[in-house]
Amino acid sequence: MIYLYGCQQVLIHVDKDLKAILEFICSEANKLSNCAVYYARQIWFKAKRYITKFELDSEMKSNRHFQTLYSQAAQQLCHSVYESFASFKQLNALYNRGELADKPRPPKYRKNGFNLVSYPKQALKLNDGQVRIPLGSQVKAWFKLDSFSLPMPSNLRFEDIKKVRILPKNRCFYAEFVYKTTTVKPDVDKSNVLGIDHGLNNWLTCLSNVGTSFIVDGKHIKSLNRWYNKQVATIKENKSQGFWSNKLATITEKRNRQIRDAINKVGRIVINHCLDNRIGRVIFGWGQGIKQEINLGKKRNQQFVQIPTARLKGRIEQLCQQYSIEFVETEEANTSAASFVDADTLPKHGEKPDSWKSSGRRIKRGLFRTAMNWYINADCNGAANIIRKVSTTLGLDLSGVSRGALTHPTRICIWVTAKKKPSDVVLTRRVASF
């Protein structure tokens, strides 16, 4: 049996005393992190070597900020700094071998504020439905306070908890419970695949070789971002650089919660479709670094870059792992231009010959005309070509991709609101006319 780890965030409803405790420990965690980064950077700049985990632990143990936190929580912070420098070491090795274009820089300091604090299961205790979280020795000496408590979520078992993180975000505090879960063995067939093409108005276009297709509508997400940007621009007008306020924190937190909810819902829609149709593979088309190089104009860039498709891809991959569905990521170069029906070649990014030409063409937004004069959905054509990119490698049969799936995909809205009845609309118009 394979064990995986899930994560559940719970908003902490704080009173005055608990808020003071959480602000204090998260502030001390931020200062300790900066102290560890400073020491590691000095070792790198002056001695031209990388810090070791033991060296960083032994140096920070005498630090005042280390002693204000619980010892294991402080060690977790130091280890996270060590891991960031270990990643910097690996990136440097890639750069020196010529496998990385941009020269990496050592980790930087965090700005004044809060940092997350992580407590392993060993430090936690459950008392009357409350998780007891200990504080550091210095806090006990200064404030005569040795711990604080948070409510245990009713849908989790304390025995499955691996760690608890205190996560500060936008002047709110979340308790993040990391718990152990098991993989599910559903009845799926790896010869059945689902190709996914991502976009803007059509956030995800999904097409399978079992004759199904659907589109996850992205207009609501785009509208949320547009309204958020408009509010931020209004509040920050004529304000100094770096201005922040409670109002900005409130609307940012609201927007982030809506985005997180949308990601979870869309991920569940994709996985449920796979389970219902015995699909054992998901092929996700992805252009690495596409958002760094995109140039669609100021307005279009803002719309495209702020859509968190990478987070959605990660969530789908996580759910695929949980349900024993194979997740394959492939580059998507020329999948939108080539015609799936006419079996056009699909050259990789940067390898397209000058003589290459598509057999069909997109005649307007959302509509693609093939050489056989078929009118099909343009994004479904892209999703089918994404499957075709890896069909030879994985030995996939694409004969199940139907004309109906290419032409009439089902559109799914993330949030569906109740529509007014016709009688209600007539009554509203009559009232408005008086």
Image: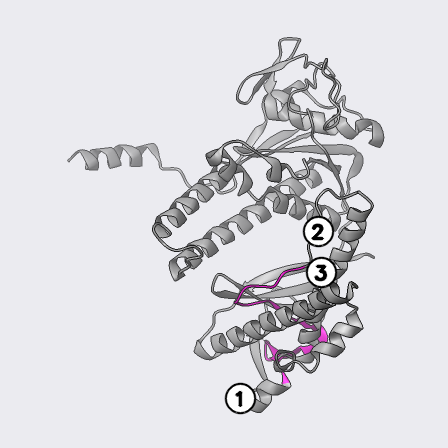
Q: Which residues are magenta?
A: 107-136
Q: Label 1 crowding class (10 Å Cα cut-off): few <14, some 14-19, many 20+?
A: few
What residue does disc 1 label? 143
Secondary element at image label 1: helix
Residue 261 lies left or right of residue 37; in this view the side is left
- Is residue 55 visible to us here? yes
Question: Residue at 54% across / 64% down in the picture?
Answer: 111
* Quarter-of-image position of residue 7: bottom right
Instruction: Kindly report the distance in space between the C-alpha atoms of the residues bearing marks 1 and 2.
Output: 43 Å
Q: Which mark is residue 211?
A: none
- Give the labeled residue for mark 3: 84
Q: Earlier in the sequence, mark 1 or mark 2?
A: 2
Q: Nearer the viewer, mark 1 or mark 3?
A: 3
* SS type, badge 3: helix
Where is mark 2, residue-wise?
A: 104
Query: Rounded to the nearest whole Å, what is the CA distance between mark 1 and mark 3?
Result: 33 Å
The quadrant of the image that shows the C terminus is top left
Residue at 52 percent of width and 36 percent of height: 301
Tell which of 406 and 332 is nearer to you: 332
User: Tag 3 or tag 1, which sits nearer the N-term?
Assistant: 3
Secondary structure category for the residue under label 2: loop
User: Which-is-in-front pick, marks 2 and 3?
Assistant: 2
